[in-house]
Amino acid sequence: MGVPYTPIYNVDIINKRRRKYTSANKSLWHYVNLFFQPRNAMLDGLVNPEYSDNHRTRRNIAVLGVANTVLQEQEIFITDGLAADELTRIYPRSEGLEILQARQKMLKSDSWISWYNSDEIKRQLMAECLVPNQVNPEHIQRFIVPDQSVANSLRGNLSSTNIQKLVVATDRGSNIFTPFPKD
């Protein structure tokens, strides 16, 4: 659609994703990676001024809220942590859902502070649903943005149906874009 964007990925992690394969013999690069918990190390690295020197990038972020109906898609995989991490295991849907059930409290928390005390917890907070090729737009429930100015800038690029899905985090009392306090 020609919408300008700034890549926010970590090149080292992308390279690891290209070299890691699922049991379907596809590289992680062939999957859309959806985090179950958006408040994770990746988002923290984008919103925390200690790590990100580009204020514009920190402010112009949208997090997509995807319906759990995506879990019914064929050929998905679920990870028990950041997929690119060598310690992370990749599971077929049914096994992965069992693992997610055990970690539900952590993954649904709106605060990463109480969970963010070790590298292992950080890895687990970045558990993913791996969807082959693309996510069907019908699964997108909302576009969560940090403030009204970002919402206003997105409105011109969204259909009328999608504009109704636009949510300003602070209007909902969410602290999703608040950086994790450093020691």
Image (cartoon, grey):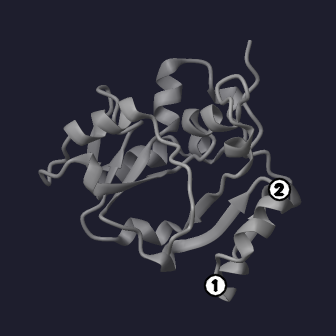
Seen as rendered, the residue at the extreme left is: 25
Residue 48 horizontal/vertical position (percent): 71, 31
Q: CA distance from mark 2 to mark 1?
A: 19 Å
Q: Which residue is mark 2?
A: 147
Residue 147 horizontal/vertical position (percent): 83, 56
| Res 155 → quadrant | bottom right
| Res 4 → quadrant | bottom right
Q: Which residue is mark 1?
A: 159
In the drawing, does residue 146 fall left or right of residue 86? right
Q: Residues within 10 Å of mark 2 (few under 14, many from 20)?
A: some
Per the image, label 2 sits on a secondary structure element best described as loop
Nearest the camera: 8 or 20?
8
Q: Amino acid at mark 1?
A: Ser
Seen as rendered, the residue at the extreme bottom is: 160
Q: Quadrant of the C terminus?
A: top right
Of the image marks 2 and 1, the number of the one nearer the N terminus:
2
- For image coordinates 50% across by 47% down, the residue present is 7
In the drawing, does residue 40 fall left or right of residue 154? left
Q: Amino acid at mark 2?
A: Asp
Nearest the camera: 150 or 105?
150
Nearest the camera: 15 or 110?
15
Residue 110 seen in the figure: no
- For image coordinates 67% across by 44% down, the residue present is 57
